[in-house]
């Protein structure tokens, strides 16, 4: 699997989160936050929509994503394929008429990283609920002015990585990134190790 396959697949998966889940949820329920579920991610309120592997699921439809435009997928699922408006300025940059192209291996790796992130965050901070944010497309929580989460990759690092991001910059060997600390998920090796990374960060910041 190449970085290019990861980057392309991440972009189109991010587009699905924005255009097919967060956008319809915002227009219906004024919420943009999403949640990790088995096999993918989902809205937290109406309309009930989820991405499961390479398909979009609603209460009445199961629509393949690959090789179709977001507009076509939305039409078949009874949704308007459009991102939330006037809510945030970042995002995937994907348009509704783009054809979704996702590599199977890359998709599996990205969704696995989300699942590990959700488990790690619930273990690390059981009183908080992890959120999948559609603008940055990361799974995260905020605790005592520190962001803890997992990104599927971005301009900083092409592959999925866990991070500890204090609101105020910190110095030290642990803090190896401009925004705090980051470790590739592939180096950490699973949810338990990711949770331990979060605990180490919290101990250094307390």
Image (cartoon, helix red, strand yellow):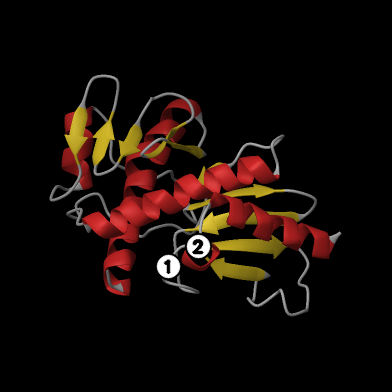
Q: Where is residue 6 in the image (x, y as percent from the top left)?
A: 32, 65
Could you tell whether 33 is left or right of 9 in the image?
A: right
Could you tell whether 56 is left or right of 160 in the image?
A: left
Could you tell whether 4 is left or right of 101 in the image?
A: right
The residue at which mark 2 appears reads as 185
Q: Which residue is drawn at 49% across and 29% down?
A: 44
| Residue 160 higher or lower than 17, as above or below | below
Q: Do the residues bearing badges 1 and 2 touch, measured as CB atoms within 8 Å?
A: yes
Q: Can residue 80 be seen in this view?
A: yes
Q: Position of residue 56 (x, y in %)?
A: 26, 36
| Residue 48 higher or lower than 24, as above or below | above
| Residue 95 higher or lower than 187, as above or below | above
Q: Distance between the residues labelled 1 and 2?
A: 8 Å
Q: Position of residue 36 (x, y in %)?
A: 47, 39
The residue at which mark 1 appears reads as 159
Residues packed near mark 2 inside 10 Å, few (<14), some (14 to 19) or many (20 plus): many
Q: Residue at x 65, y 42 (%)?
A: 123
Q: Which disc number belongs to residue 189? A: none
Q: Is mark 2 on a helix, strand or loop?
A: helix
Residue located farthest toward the top when viewing the structure as drawn: 60
Q: In which quarter of the image is the N terminus?
A: bottom left
Q: Quadrant of residue 60?
A: top left
Numbered label tally: 2
Q: What element carries label 1?
A: loop
Q: In which quarter of the image is the C terminus?
A: bottom right
Q: Where is residue 90 in the image (x, y as percent from the top left)?
A: 48, 59
Residues packed near mark 1 inside 10 Å, few (<14), some (14 to 19) or many (20 plus): many
Please identify, in this view, whether the residue under mark 1 or under mark 2 is nearer the observer.
Answer: 2
Residue located farthest toward the right when viewing the structure as drawn: 206
Q: In which quarter of the image is residue 85?
A: top left
């Amino acid at each position: 699997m190449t970085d290019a396959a990861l980057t392309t697949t991440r972009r189109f998966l991010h587009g699905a989160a924005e255009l097919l889940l967060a956008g319809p949820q915002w227009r219906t329920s004024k919420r943009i936050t999403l949640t990790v579920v088995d096999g993918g991610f989902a809205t937290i309120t109406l309309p009930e929509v989820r991405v499961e592997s390479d398909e979009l699921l609603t209460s009445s439809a199961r629509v393949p994503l690959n090789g179709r435009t977001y507009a076509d997928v939305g039409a078949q699922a009874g949704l308007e394929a459009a991102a939330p408006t006037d809510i945030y300025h970042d995002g995937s940059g994907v348009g509704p008429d783009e054809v979704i192209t996702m590599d199977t291996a890359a998709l599996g790796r990205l969704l696995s990283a989300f699942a590990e992130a959700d488990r790690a965050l619930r273990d690390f901070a059981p009183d908080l609920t992890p959120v999948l944010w559609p603008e940055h497309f990361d799974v995260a929580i905020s605790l005592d002015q520190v962001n803890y989460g997992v990104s599927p990759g971005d301009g900083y690092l092409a592959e999925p990585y866990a991070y500890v991001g204090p609101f105020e910059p910190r110095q030290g060997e642990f803090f190896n990134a401009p925004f705090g600390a980051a470790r590739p998920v592939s180096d950490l090796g699973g949810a338990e190790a990711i949770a331990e990374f979060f605990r180490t960060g919290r101990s250094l910041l307390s």
